[in-house]
Each structure stands twice: as C-alpha cells, then as structure tokens.
Image (spheres, grey):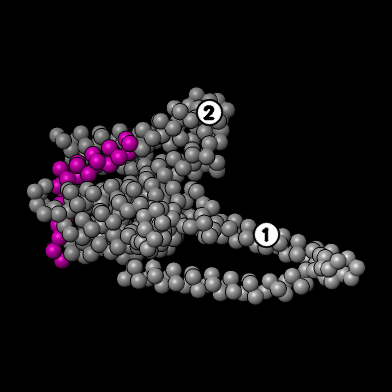
Amino acid sequence: MDIGRGFRRIALYLRKLSAGLVGLFAALPRFFRRLVKWRPGQGGYSPSSENLKVTGRLLILGVLLIVSFYVVGAFMINTIDTNLDFKPLNAPEAGQSRAVAITTALIDREVNAHGWTANDPFFKPAALLDNMPNFQQGLIASLARFSFELTDQLGRTRGSSQADPDLQEASGLLQYSGDKWLWDPSVSLMPTATSEQQYRKAAKALSAYNKRLSTGEAVFERRSDNLLATLDRIALDIGSSSAVIDTFVGEKSGFPFHRQADDVFYTVKGQSYGYYMILRALGEDFKDVIKERNLESSYAEMLRSFQLTAEMEPLVIMNGTPDSQIIPCHLCSQGFYLLRGRTQLREITNILLK
C-alpha cells in the first residue's frame, strides 16, 4: 500500500513538473518579444531598456518570494517540543503500560502533529532547519532504545520465552534511519519507505500491544529485575551520549561558534527529553517496586536531572572551553546534568540489586 502511494505521489510530482515546463516554454516566445524591440538601422533586435528594468524587477521579486517561502516556512514549521506535561490523548486502561502509551503518543506527535523534518528534501522549507531534525532524531533514538527493552525484558515472561510479535515489529521499525525520504537513489531508483511511514507502523504495533495488555493477551512484567535491566540499559545509552559530548568538547571546543556543536546539543536534548518521559511513566508502571525499595526520593531526583537536561534552551549554542571565563560551554553544562542523571540511575539499580 505504501509503495502504491509512493508511485501516486511521484506521478503527481511529474504531472505538476511537466505542466509547469509546458507553460514555461509556451510563455518564452511572448516573453522575448516583449523583452526586445525591433530597432531599424541597428541591425535587428536589441533589448529594450524599459523591458530590461521590468525583467530585473521580476527576477528580484522571484528571488524574494523564494527566500520568503523558505525562511517564513521554516520559521513556522520549527518546533522543539519539550512539554513535560504532555500526555497521551486517551488515558491508559487497566492493565496497560503507561510507558508504552507515552512512547506511542510521542511518535504520533512528532510524525503527525509536528511533522517529521529530518528527511525533508531541498524543495521543502524544513530543509533549512537544523535543530529540530536533530532533536527529533535524538527523541526517536531514546524511544527505539526503550523498544528493545520492551522486546527483550518487559514484554516477555522470562528471557527464554517467546518475544511479543508486535514489540518485535515496533523495535525493528524504530531502528529505521530518520533521514529516508520517498526516493533514495543511493538505495534504489524505485520509491522506498519513508521514515514517517516506518514510525507510524511502529506506533500502531505498540498501540496494538497495549490493547492486548488490557485484555490479558500480552504480558508486561512488573518485576524488579526487569526494571533493573531496563534502567541499566538506559544508563549505558546515556553513557554513550556523554562520551560523544566529552569527545567533542575535548577536540573542538574553543571557537565560540561551531556548526556541529548545536547538532550534538539538540540530539542529546531530544534523547534526554524522551528518557525523561519514559522514565516518569515507568515510575508509574513500577510504583509498587519503587515504593517497596524506598526509591521514591531517589527516583524523583533522577527525573529532575533529566528534566533539567531537556529544558536547557540557550538562545545560541556557545562552544567555549570548559575553563573559559568569558565564552560559555553549553555542551559542558548539558553533559554535567546528563552524567548526574546517569549516576542517579546507577544508584537506583544498585539498590535494586540488593
């Protein structure tokens, strides 16, 4: 069905393109007749100064319209949504997982409500955007990591039991690259599945799994060892991101403005926001375990660290050195809160081990 839709979209683009070219070529003779005038004694046609002025103005107007289309369009599209109060449209039913529900809702929000921008081609205004695509990629990366834990830990009775088919499908689809558009000549000359299409399928699979939870046809194991394993994997992923920040600061900090500094910053920002939302929902799913181990205070402090990481929003990402007294190092500040959250996760998992 997606391939058929792809063919129809390409056919529509080709029809519009061909119609535009036909109109252009049809208008060229009239355009040149107006542009030049016959001047006897000068050997034929020569440009009219009046028409050259009109043509120049039209060209300037065309350039301004194109620039306005991209700049205004990009400004209107740009949305970095770190709403901490965001919740699924419908509250989870009895037996369902709040973490699965918020994961599904976040995918739907970024793909359908805000629009996926990481794969927009050059002729769309969002192609000018940089921070929003990186934020969305970081957010999806956190959701993809959690989907692994759903498949391997939370969504099965024991490690040797069969994995849930909906969770397997969702986990695989969320690994799909976020920059794939309808046509990717490096892969095939035929239409391919876009990132949005794959993520929408993943959201449907997660929603189907959660519905089966409410009817008892699927499992979501709320055991302390499952929570431990999930938090441990999240901590490892955060450690990888902190290493990226450390490497960047060590090798490329100093010059105030670096074109890659904001890429790293907003990718980690999206990841931190995604993990905050997932961890908060997991705290509700595993509230009995957290209460039994007296982890309420530690869990709240850990969430606070991820909240601070996600809410950082400097006007311009400055790339100063860690010891600079004049130029801020925003990646250093972000890395501090990120490592603080990771350390607090480790403290919680150490208690769960006992």
Identify the main secondary structure in magenta: helix
Q: Determine whether 204 is above or below 237 in the image.
A: below
Q: Residue at x 41, y 44 (%)?
A: 267
Q: Residues within 10 Å of mark 2 (few under 14, many from 20)?
A: some
Q: Amino acid at mark 1?
A: Leu
- In the rendered image, which quarter contains the N terminus? bottom left
| Badge 2 element | loop
Q: Residue at x 36, y 55 (%)?
A: 187
Q: Earlier in the sequence, mark 1 or mark 2?
A: 1
Q: Mark 1 or 2, which is nearer the eye?
A: 1
Q: Residues within 10 Å of mark 1 (few under 14, many from 20)?
A: few
In this view, the residue in front, 28 or 83, is 28
Q: Residue at x 35, y 71 (%)?
A: 4
Q: Which residue is mark 2?
A: 254
Q: Residue at x 17, y 48 (%)?
A: 153
70 on left or right of 182: right
Q: Horizontal and vertical percent for residue 345?
A: 27, 37
**Residue 53 visible in rendering:** yes
**Residue 273 visible in rendering:** no
Q: Horizontal and vertical percent for residue 111?
A: 39, 60
- The span picked out in magenta is 215-240
In this view, the residue in front, 14 or 137, is 14
Q: Horizontal and vertical percent for residue 269?
A: 42, 44
Which image quarter: residue 87? bottom left
Q: Which residue is mark 1?
A: 64
- In the rendered image, which quarter contains the C terminus? top left
304 on left or right of 228: right
